[in-house]
Every structure is written in C-alpha cells, then in structure tokens.
C-alpha cells in the first residue's frame, strides 16, 4: 500500500490564464521553486476560456486532478473573466462531486503574476492531495487508453 | 551536545532565527536590559550560531521578565522572549535529568523499573 | 496533415542541464505530422533562427513547434522568424520547457519525460492551427497622464515635446505632487521648488499639455490606441477662466481654522484657498466641507471681494469624455499611517513628527517660515533623534515588507541640514542598515558623518516616552557598543515607510493593469520592460511601480514617455488575431455571448440563410467586431450551441492539448 502511494504519479492538468497565473508559473521557474513534474500546464488567454468540457475531457482521458488558476478577483486582465470562471467551476465541481469525482481533485486558485511562491505552494499541496486520493477511475473512458 | 541543544531550542520555541535582520529593536525595548549579560538580540544571534552552552550558563535567562515587549515590537516577528524561555526550559530539563534519549535507555533498564515508565518517559522527554 | 518541424533549444545549460534535449528531439520526431526535428544551443540567436527559417523552406513546413523558454519571453521572436521564412506567424507554438520544466525539476529523467509530454501537447495543438491574419486599428494621437507629480509632469513634458497632445489629470487643486512639499533634494541639496516650479510652469504654458487639476479619472474603456476616459472635473466653485489667482478671497474668508493639507495640518488655511504661491493652475478652490455659503447659504464674502467676479457657488461637477492612444499611470505615494507604532509616541507628542512633516518645518514656505522650531512650544530644539525604517522591512503586519528606498538618503539630508544651520544641536540617527546605492549617494551620507558630525548609531529605537517637562525620553539600543541608550531628546523624526496612493488599487482595476500584493503596479518584465504594464497601452511612471527617489522617477518618467511616443508615432496598430469567431450556421441568436462580453464586441444581425428545402430563412446571428474583441474567450463557454470559438485557442486545440497530456 505504502509502495503504491509513493510510486503513484498522478496526472494533473493545470489551466493557467496568460496574464496572471501563467506568469506566476514562469516566476516560480525563474526563482527555481520546484513542484512535482506531474503538473502540466495548458495556457489559456483567461480563466473564463476554460470550458467545462475541457475538464470533463481531462477526467475522461484519465487525469487524476484538474486545477484552474486565474487572476485574483478584481484583477482580471479582461475585467470580469475570473468571476465567470468561478461561477462555472462552482457548478461543475459540485456536479463532478455528485458523479464521484471528489471535490479535492478539482480546484480553483487565484495566483497573480507576482506570486511565484504561491504558485509552487499551490501545486505542491494540490499534487499531495491528489496523491493521497489515489488514481481516478470514475470518469475514465478505458476505450481511450491504448 | 550543542547542536542537539540548538535543534531542541528551535523546536520548543518555534522561532525562526534566520528571519532576524539585526535591528536591535528587541534590546532597545527591553526593560531588564541592564540586568542581563546577554541581551535579547544576542539570544537570537547566539542561538543561530549554536552558542547554547554560554546562554545556558548565564544568569540572563532568569533576568527576563517575560513581558514580551520584544515580541510585540519586533518588525520581523522573530520572538526573542520565546528563545529565552526555551533556553530556561532546556536548563531545567537537564538539571532534573528529565531528558531522555533512546541511547540512554539500556542503562536505565532493571527489573524493578516497569517498562511502561520508560516508554512514557521517552515519549514525554524526548520531544 | 501538417508538416511540422520541432526545434528543441538548450538555452545553454538552462534547459540542457536538466533535460536531455537530444532525447526530446528524437522522441518528438516520431509524433504524427512531424517531418523534421532538431536541437540547438540557442534557438533565439541569429544562427538558431536561421536553422528554423532554413527548415521551413527546405522541408516545406506548415507548422513549427519550439521547445524553449516561456512564450511570454520569445513567442514574438519566433513568430517573426516564421514570418520571415514565409510561414504564417500563428502557425508557431511554444512548449515551455524552461520555466515550467528544466528550472523546477532537478532529476533529468523526470524533466526529460515532462519536456516530451509538453512538446507532444504543442504538436497536437499545432496540428489544428490555422493561419491567422491580424487586423489593424487606428491610433488616437493623444496621451493621458494620471497623476501630476514630478513623474507625471516629466512624462507629459517629454510627450508634448515630441509633438503629441497630453492631458494631465491631478486630483489635487494643483500639479506638483509630493515634491512641492520638500525643502531640499539629495544629494546636491538644490531646493525642490527651484527645480520643480519651472517645470510646472512649462506644463501650463505648453500648447500640447492640457491640465485637468482637481479632477479624477472615473472610467476607462477601450484598448491600446483607442482608450476612452471619463474625467470628473470636481467643482471648484470658482470660474477658472475668470480667476486671476490674486488671493484676495483667501485673505478675507472668515473660516480660518481649517487644517492646511499642504503643511500636513501643522497650520491652518481658509475655506477658499490656493494650496501654495506657485500653484499651477493658480486658481482658488472652495472647500465645500467648510464653506459657510455652500453649507448654510450664509456668507458670500469671497464673491463680494473678488474683483474678477470668478466665484460661482452654483458650479457643478463636470464629466469630460476624451479619447487617448496611451495611458501613463503616475499616481505616486503617501507615507504610511503610524497608528500601529505606539512605541514611538507619534500620537502622544506633537514633537514626534514624520520626515515629511519635518520637511515642512524646515521649508521657508512652511508653517515656521523655515526656522526649525518644536511644534509643541515653538522653542529651538537642541537634541534631535532620527529613527529609520519605521514600518519599512516590517513583516510583522504593522508595516510594509519592502525597503522604502528613499529614507536613508533623506534622513542623512535632514541630519546634515540641521547640523549646518544649527551647529549647537546634537543629532542622532538610528539605523539598521544604511542603504545608499546611487551616484554620489554614499559620499553624501559619509559627509553627514565626517563633516557634519551626525551621530550614526547602529540600532533601533524601542520606546519614545514624552515627559511632563516636554522632553522626549528615547530608549534605544546601540548594537556595536552593545548597550542600551537613554537620550533626552527635544524632537524625534520618524522615517515612515511609503506606500502607493490609495487610489492606485481602484485605478488598477479600471485599467486592468496588474498589481503586486503591496499595490504597486507590476511591470511587463522586471528587467527588460520596466516602464510598461503587461496591459498593452498602459505605462508606468514613478513610485506607483515601486519606491524610487527623484532622479530615478525622472528617468522612468522619460522612459515611459519614450514608449508612449513610440506608440503614438504609429498610424496603425496590428491587433491580436486570436479573437472570437461565430459559426453562423450553428448560432441560434440567443444573446448569451453578448451578455458576458466585457467589451461589447458582439452584435446581432439578421441574415438570410438558404435552408435545405431551398427556402430562404432570415435568422438572427451573432457577429464579432474583431477590432474590439480582446480574445478572452468568455463567450465561447457561454455559447450553448458551441457556435462561438476562439481563434488560436479553439475548443479542438485545447482539447487536443488535454488529450496529449493525459495520454501517458
């Protein structure tokens, strides 16, 4: 059991908005603040670009956790995008919870361009949480697996 | 011994000595300053350097009034008074031989001593 | 099927140190569509770019994936490279294997594996890329400068000098900012007013500069080259065209006991006032909170004495709407409030003052006409204690975590000037570190010690206690002689930390310009783009971006002006082609997208469609104004029928990235 937990490498998709959190991720890199390689970042213009479909798709394809990062409320480059994202994700995550994808596997975080340290901390804690939950099989479509 | 004491003091006090920027506001605000051989800012510096023996041998630890003015005023949140307290505690523990490490246990074993007592003592005094 | 080329950059050892670049290039060469794959030491160098150009031509590439640093760094570079080789620049995708891979992972196999996955995701995306052509938009040849301190003044003068129109919006009745309150300036000790007021006058006289004093920016809309701002001109109750600034009214007004903001409340002004003699514009202003006529309808004395007939009690706030091509933020700073620092006795004794108050006490135009007198009893002080870092470098929550940068120098200046004017005084400066990087700065500080005999003591003040006889008991530590000092002082001067002006936060939101946790505006790149905000068309000048002294502020102000001039000199701007697009065949005209669009870029049209049964139907469909759309993508998610998509970040592209990442 212990062995599985230490060797388990979760697949984690992080959607980061171009203006704040992607820049925050870059800053984490510039400052050499490490977080697990399990996190793979997809750049989107704004957190409101993230369609719930993308998140469902990620779980269908076997992702173990999905995190969405945007600008702090009030700081959105497009004025209001992160508010839309917050509302949409609140609904989506409670629906996913109903479907058996634990709430801990999904997360929305606000990370500004100046918060490299927060980005790394967030990713470390998120990976740790997902790791403790183990593999996600609920929505995974086995036909998609080679 | 000193390194062990240093770790012990950092742990019991919960102070991060590296946050200190050496402004001396703790000593500037200390009401028992003149009574002390080592002053609040020196406690921080000496713990960082591992000079615990000197602190433990000094009367300064009993001169601290625990008024916590240094904690209140420190701009970096270092909390020197907690270090004084931790050094004091360390001295008391060593005086009363109420500190225990796993290595010490074989010497203590005898038929009259219930094992339970040793386990409890280790749990209590090894922190 | 695309013909894709993959180019893996070593970035010297930055990437190659932790990622096996050859293995990445090899692994990605087997991906579908990849016809060429290579690695090179520095892809962004000329030689590296030539490798890309040659490959595009020789291999007839239709898509390019570059595994390198962040796209925020070199996406533009590589797009230009592709364009130079005849490929549409938007057929280039970057896999970020430096900031988000090699720099954060230490283990080579792990980092290499992640780099391959990131490369795969980029390849999967580029498979679905389509050539995009950027639209063009015109540039309004006028700049808006928010804040009329030395930063705003210098920026405005430089822009105006280049022949472009500039509006300065200043919330105070006069421009000039904090610098008008200073006495002398370090390290040369010229008088602040002597070097600032000519610049203020230049602003007023320059045909290209329009000053909106006593005004605030209320709303900003639009985008780079095409901003529209609403400026609220607050009612002064004085007709600016008639007022001659003679000051007759300010002497006759019966409301005499109003704390004078310009002297930080250390003396009084009237309800109608001109902040100071060199104010620009020199127009009287009625303070509506204290004027008897405006409050109770009784008095009207100022109207009676005004020879020009300029007083107008019925004046209303006025909203002006203006178009701008660029906006410069120069909102400046304020010293922090000291209510959390009881130990220094600021609220207990009037003889404990902040450094800015001390400036006024030594200024010839100040409340004491430049003679240094104790505020409590008007006597000459003999012992002065200066305390540095009051609230700066403070992580305890009472102050600010950063270094305020200017305090070491102005404290040295104050100490020096006091010793020069009053050699009978003893001056103590308590410091944690003396930070004097700057041209002739350290020499200046050393002069204070060596020539003027200022006592610099390494240590901090712990307590200031006012005594009944008016003396201040200062208890401090001297860390070098390791003793606690007790000084009987006549005055204590606190070098309070500086913080961004309170209006900055709301302005940042209005401009969608990002800020750090201390409310300083963030620059587009900390080293390479220090005067631009990440939001296009917004520029930063002065302390609003971070603590600065006057020389630095002026340099940044001129730098921001150069950037603005560069922008305004263009006739057309190339837009961002990654905009929303609506599939008219799928759109059902429900208006969901219109409601979420923050820019009003979506409109509806009734269009004729040929139906399968050969009839013609008129349907209401959405259409996107590409010049106005900024490409956030909010509409794409709101659309229930999936008709709305975002070019460059389409649903299928992002989905392909998700698939590639989850495939492992």
Image (cartoon, helix red, strand yellow):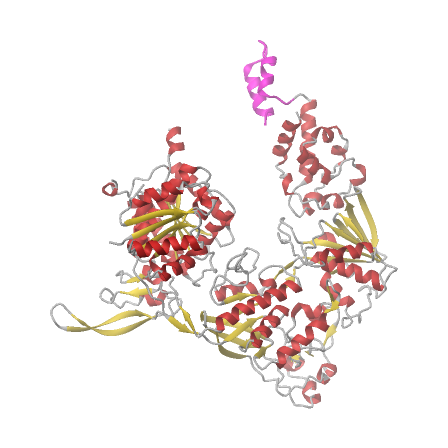
Whole-percent x, y for residue C566 in the image: 50, 70
Whole-percent x, y for residue A119 in the image: 47, 48
Q: Nearer the viewer, residue C615 or C269?
A: C615
**Quarter of the image where the C terminus of chain C is located:** top left
B114 lies left or right of B30? left
Answer yes or no: is residue C417 visible: yes
C222 lies left or right of C374? left
Q: Quadrant of residue C240?
A: bottom right
Residue B99 lies in the magenta-colored region: yes
Residue C581 lies in the magenta-colored region: no
Does C607 sit above or below residue C6? below
Image label count: 0
Span colored in magenta: B98-127
Does C308 sit above or below residue A46? below
Q: Nearer the viewer, residue A80 or C430?
A: C430
Q: Quadrant of residue C76?
A: bottom left
Q: Which residue occupies 66% across, 48% down?
A: B75
C99 lies left or right of C545? left
């Amino acid at each position: 059991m212990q062995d599985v937990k230490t060797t388990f490498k979760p697949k984690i998709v992080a959607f980061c908005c171009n203006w704040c959190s992607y820049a925050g991720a870059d800053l984490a890199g510039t400052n050499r603040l490490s977080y697990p390689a399990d996190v793979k970042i997809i750049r989107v213009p704004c957190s409101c670009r993230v369609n719930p479909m993308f998140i469902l798709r990620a779980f269908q394809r076997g992702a173990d956790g999905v995190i969405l990062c945007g600008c702090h409320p009030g700081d959105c480059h497009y004025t209001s995008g992160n508010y839309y994202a917050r509302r949409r994700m609140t609904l989506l995550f409670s629906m996913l919870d109903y479907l058996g994808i634990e709430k801990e596997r999904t997360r929305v975080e606000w990370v500004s361009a100046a918060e490299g340290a927060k980005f790394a901390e967030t990713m470390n804690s998120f990976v740790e949480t997902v790791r403790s939950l183990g593999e996600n099989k609920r929505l995974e479509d086995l036909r998609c697996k080679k | 011994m000193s390194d062990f004491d240093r770790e012990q003091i950092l742990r019991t006090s919960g102070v991060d000595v590296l946050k200190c920027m050496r402004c001396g506001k703790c000593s500037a605000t200390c009401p028992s300053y003149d009574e002390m051989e080592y002053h609040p800012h020196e406690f921080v510096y000496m713990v960082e350097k591992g000079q615990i023996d000197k602190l433990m041998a000094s009367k300064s630890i009993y001169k601290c009034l625990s008024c916590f003015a240094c904690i209140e005023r420190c701009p970096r949140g270092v909390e020197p008074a907690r270090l004084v307290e931790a050094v004091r505690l360390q001295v008391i523990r060593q005086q009363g031989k109420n500190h225990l490490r796993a290595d010490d246990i074989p010497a203590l074993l005898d038929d009259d001593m219930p094992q339970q007592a040793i386990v409890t003592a280790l749990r209590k005094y090894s922190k | 099927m695309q013909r894709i080329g993959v180019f893996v950059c070593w970035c010297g050892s930055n990437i190659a140190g932790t990622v096996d670049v050859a293995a990445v290039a090899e692994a990605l060469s087997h991906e579908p569509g990849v016809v060429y794959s290579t690695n090179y030491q520095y892809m962004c160098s000329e030689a590296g770019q030539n490798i890309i150009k040659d490959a595009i031509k020789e291999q007839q590439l239709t898509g390019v994936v570059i595994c390198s640093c962040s796209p925020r760094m070199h996406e533009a570079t590589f797009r230009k490279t592709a364009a130079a080789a005849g490929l549409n620049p938007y057929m280039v995708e970057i896999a970020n294997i430096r900031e988000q891979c090699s720099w954060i992972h230490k283990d080579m196999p792990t980092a290499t594996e992640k780099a391959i996955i990131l490369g795969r995701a980029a390849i999967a995306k580029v498979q679905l890329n389509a050539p995009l052509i950027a639209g063009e938009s015109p540039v309004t040849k006028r700049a808006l400068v928010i804040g009329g301190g030395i930063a705003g003044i210098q920026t405005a003068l430089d822009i105006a000098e280049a022949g472009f129109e500039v509006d300065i919006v200043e919330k105070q009745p006069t421009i000039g900012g904090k610098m008008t309150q200073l006495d002398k300036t370090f390290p040369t000790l010229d008088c602040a007013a002597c070097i600032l007021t000519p610049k203020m006058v230049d602003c007023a006289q320059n045909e290209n500069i329009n000053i909106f004093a006593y005004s605030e920016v209320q709303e900003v809309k639009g985008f780079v080259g095409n901003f529209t701002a609403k400026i609220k001109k607050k009612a002064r109750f004085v007709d600016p065209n008639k007022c001659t600034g003679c000051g007759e009214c300010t002497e006759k007004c019966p409301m005499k006991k109003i704390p004078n903001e310009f002297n930080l409340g250390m003396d009084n002004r009237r309800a109608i006032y001109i902040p100071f003699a060199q104010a620009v514009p020199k127009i009287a202003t009625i303070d509506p909170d204290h004027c008897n006529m405006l409050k109770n309808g009784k008095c009207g004395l100022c109207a009676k004495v005004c020879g020009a007939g300029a007083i107008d009690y019925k004046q209303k706030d006025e909203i002006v709407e203006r178009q701008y091509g660029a906006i410069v933020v120069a909102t400046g700073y304020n010293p922090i409030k000291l209510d959390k620092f009881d130990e220094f006795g600021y609220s207990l004794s009037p003889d404990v003052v902040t450094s800015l108050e001390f400036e006024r006490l030594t200024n010839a135009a100040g409340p004491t006409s430049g003679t240094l007198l104790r505020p409590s009893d008007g006597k000459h002080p003999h012992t002065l204690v200066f305390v540095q870092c009051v609230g700066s470098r403070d992580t305890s929550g009472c102050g600010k975590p950063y270094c305020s940068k200017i305090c070491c120098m102005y404290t040295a200046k104050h100490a020096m000037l006091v010793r020069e004017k009053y050699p009978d005084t003893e001056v103590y400066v308590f410091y944690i570190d003396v930070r004097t990087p700057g041209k002739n700065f350290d020499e200046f500080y050393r002069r204070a010690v060596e020539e003027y005999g200022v006592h610099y003591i390494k240590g901090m003040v712990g307590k200031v206690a006012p005594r009944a006889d008016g003396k201040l008991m200062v208890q401090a530590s001297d860390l070098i002689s390791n003793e606690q000092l007790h000084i009987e002082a006549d005055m204590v001067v606190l070098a309070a930390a500086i913080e961004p002006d309170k209006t900055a936060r709301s302005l940042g939101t209005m401009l969608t310009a990002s800020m750090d946790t201390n409310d300083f505006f963030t620059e587009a790149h900390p080293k390479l783009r220090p005067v631009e905000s990440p939001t296009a068309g917004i520029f930063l000048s002065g302390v609003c971006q971070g603590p600065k002294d006057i020389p630095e502020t002026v340099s940044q102000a001129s730098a921001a002006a150069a950037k603005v001039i560069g922008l305004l000199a263009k006739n057309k701007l190339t837009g961002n082609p990654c905009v929303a697009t609506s599939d008219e065949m799928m759109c059902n005209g429900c208006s969901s997208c219109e409601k979420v669009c923050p820019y009003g870029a979506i409109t509806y049209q009734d269009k004729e469609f040929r139906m399968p049964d050969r009839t013609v139907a008129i349907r209401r469909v959405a259409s996107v104004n590409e010049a106005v759309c900024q490409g956030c993508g909010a509409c794409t998610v709101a659309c229930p029928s999936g008709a709305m998509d975002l070019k460059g970040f389409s649903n299928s592209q992002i989905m392909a990235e998700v698939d590639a990442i989850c495939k492992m």
